Image (cartoon, grey):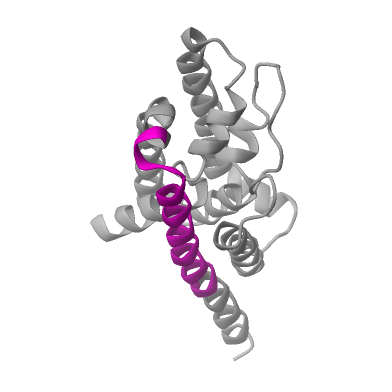
Amino acid sequence: MSDSFFHAFILLFLVTDPVGNIPFFVSALAHVPAARRWRIVVRECIIAFILLLLFMLLGRHFLAAIQLSEVSLRIGGGLVLFLIALRMIFPQPGGIMGDVSGGHEPFIVPLAIPALAGPSALATVLLFSSGTSTELTLHIGALSAVAVVWLIILLAANRLQAMLGERVMIAFERLMGLILTAISVEMLLAGLRHYVESFS
């Protein structure tokens, strides 16, 4: 049971990538008065948490409504995670989410969505929704724990970026991208294995 919680926690931490989002949050909040930044971080983390929780709780009904099997979700989710992981390892101009410069206060987009609750995170929590009620409880606990980690890391984003430096941040994000690549391949292989076994 503890292994399931730990696995879910690590996977959610990797796909939401709070450490990799530090420069993203710092850039998006650069034009916001310092006294308001912590409120925005808390608000965006809560919005992302609620969205992911809704997808986790209602995911099974959503899959049934659109007649989507767990196998296809595993394969599709694995592909999405793989593409996100590649972008973490080989950064694109403007970062994973593109340019976030601007003089307005961000609301929901782009910090809550897609920075935290992006396609890979949504696909992951949908996968979690197909488990038993005990597993679902563990996954909700893991999501709650990850949300607390978001707050701790992102509230200290400016200090962490200044303390660690750009090179350390890039190296850490690429390391997480490498780990996420392995997880996405494993998810993809598991989906293909279940698909082949369905014909035997």
- Is residue 1 in sight in this rendering? no
Where residue 111 appears, as percent x and y from the top left, is: 60, 31
Q: Quadrant of the C terminus?
A: bottom right
Tell me how many marks there are.
0
From this viewpoint, which residue is outermost toward the bottom? Answer: 200
Q: Predominant secondary structure in magenta? A: helix
Which image quadrant is residue 85 in? bottom right
Q: Residue furthest left?
A: 2
Left or right: residue 96 compared with residue 5: right
Q: Is 166 included in the stretch rendered in magenta?
A: yes
Q: Nearer the viewer, residue 161 or 53?
A: 161
From where the camera sits, is residue 66 visible? yes
Q: Residue at x 67, y 44 (%)?
A: 97
76 with respect to 10 (left or right): right
Nearest the eye: 97 or 9: 97
The x and y percentages for residue 132 are 42, 55
- The picture places residue 81, in percent across and down from the top left corner, at 59, 61
Image check: 138 left or right of 22? left
Name the residue: 48% across, 46% down: 17
Question: Which residue is rendered at x = 49% and y = 45% of the image?
Answer: 20
Q: Is residue 35 above or below residue 151?
A: above
Location of residue 67 by image quarter = bottom right
Q: Picture coordinates of residue 158 (x, y %)?
A: 43, 28
Above/below status of 50 relative to 15: above
Quadrant into which the N terminus falls = bottom left
Identify the residue shown where x is 59% and y is 53%: 120
In this picture, which residue range is highlighted in magenta?
A: 162-186
For the residue pair 188 and 36, the one nearer the viewer reads as 36
